[in-house]
Image (cartoon, rainbow, N blue to C red):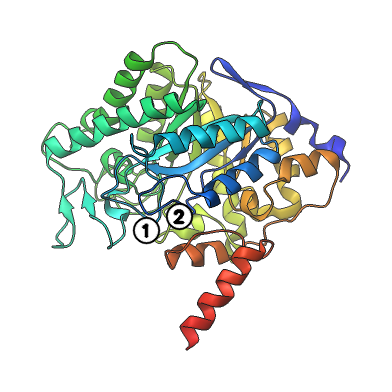
Amino acid sequence: MPVESYEALFVPCPVGQRTAPNRLVAQPMECGNGTAGGGVSELTLKRYSNLADGHWGIVFVEAVSITDTSLAHRNGLVINRKNLDGYKRLVEALKKNDPDSLFMVQLTHSGIRSGAFSRVTSACPVDRDDIHYLSSDEIEHIRQRFVEGTVMVAEAGADGVDLKLCHGYLTTELIRPANIRSDHWGGDFENRITFFQQTIKEIQERLGHTGFLLGSRISMYEGIRGGCGTGGPDEIIEDLTEMKLIVERMDEMELDYINVSAGLPGITTEMFAPNKSSKSLFLNHFRYAKTVKEMNTSLKVIGSAYSVLKEQGPVYAADNIDKAFVDFAGFGRQSMADPLYPKKLQAGKKINFCTACMGCGRLYEKETTVGCVIYNEYYKNLSHKLKADHQK
């Protein structure tokens, strides 16, 4: 396919008061390569410096936790005052490699998806002794940590944040219809979005009109009873009514973008990240992104699930952008398979396409650092070692 076929991917696009140099997005991929305290390691610096060398339009720094007590990965990244200098060093390195790309940080609290090695919490009542049910005051404390975390990200020099509302993390629990808490954090729709709305409002008050970008990655439909994209706590059939209301609220709050996703890792995994046998599920992602785009908000829309399409990924991405179904095309696993993807694509060079082998997912499940086991020798050797150790 000639490079001219991808011209739409390399047209700059304004986002808030900033401009992305192209339409290709490196999605936040949780790789567990932080230091013991969640700080930026040399492996973290190498990973994101490689992405900067690829000249992506937007690069999201993976699921950075606002707490060090509840983590999804043993070596997950954490934002706090102790680690702040590391994030300043990270942003400085990225901007040195590529001053034009937008570098964003995704902030999260793992909640019920926290590993057993840390404190597993839930915003919704759970009949399990190993899960701590959060009190109203504890949720407020966590909300404040999101605000402080965002302020620190701004201090580090990043271009913006993504307040994670997807894939089953704490903030996702709060907005689900299944959140039937009796306090002001749950029950009806207005209560369930209180956390998100108050957090955004306070961040905007703290940062003012500096051009710092605000947005969120959301799961339009999770495929579980009472999950996002259903019509009630006992429903499982897709009903996007409330998710569209959340999109409208994001627009009313003057957020800059929305990163559209779906599914729930570990539960509806194929919906979240289509693989070889479930490839056609990419069409759901395209439909959700198009649905959001057709709402005609001021939000820039980032679509997902392009990695599974391999050589056809840029073809579909350019087509969706040309037809105004999305503003940006997001690549997760592909960004690990070939960090230089945008630069190679524009230059017509050979690309290491993601094979959807899910080897990166298996590394994640083993709570080790995560990367591509096909093209990256470090992770290929790590995968072989883990397999050999398991067979002993």
For this orientation, the residue located farthest to the bottom is 392
In this rendering, position of residue 62 left or right of residue 205: right
Residue topped by disc 2: 32
User: Alpha carbon of mark 1 to alpha carbon of mark 2: how far?
Assistant: 7 Å
Image location (x, y in percent) of residue 164: 40, 38
Q: Earlier in the sequence, mark 1 or mark 2?
A: 2
Q: Which mark is residue 198?
A: none
Residue topped by disc 1: 74
172 in relation to 92, above or below: below
Residue depicted at x 32% and y 14%: 205
| The image quarter in which residue 50 lies | top right
The amino acid type found where label 2 is placed reads Gly
Residue depicted at x 45% and y 30%: 161
- Residue 89 or 167: which is nearer the viewer? 89
Q: Are marks 1 and 2 in contact (CB under 8 Å)?
A: yes
In this rendering, position of residue 360 left or right of residue 239: right
Image location (x, y in percent) of residue 361: 51, 62
Disc 1 is placed on an element classified as loop
Residue depicted at x 59% and y 64%: 379
- Residue 83 or 70: which is nearer the viewer? 83
233 in relation to 255, above or below: below
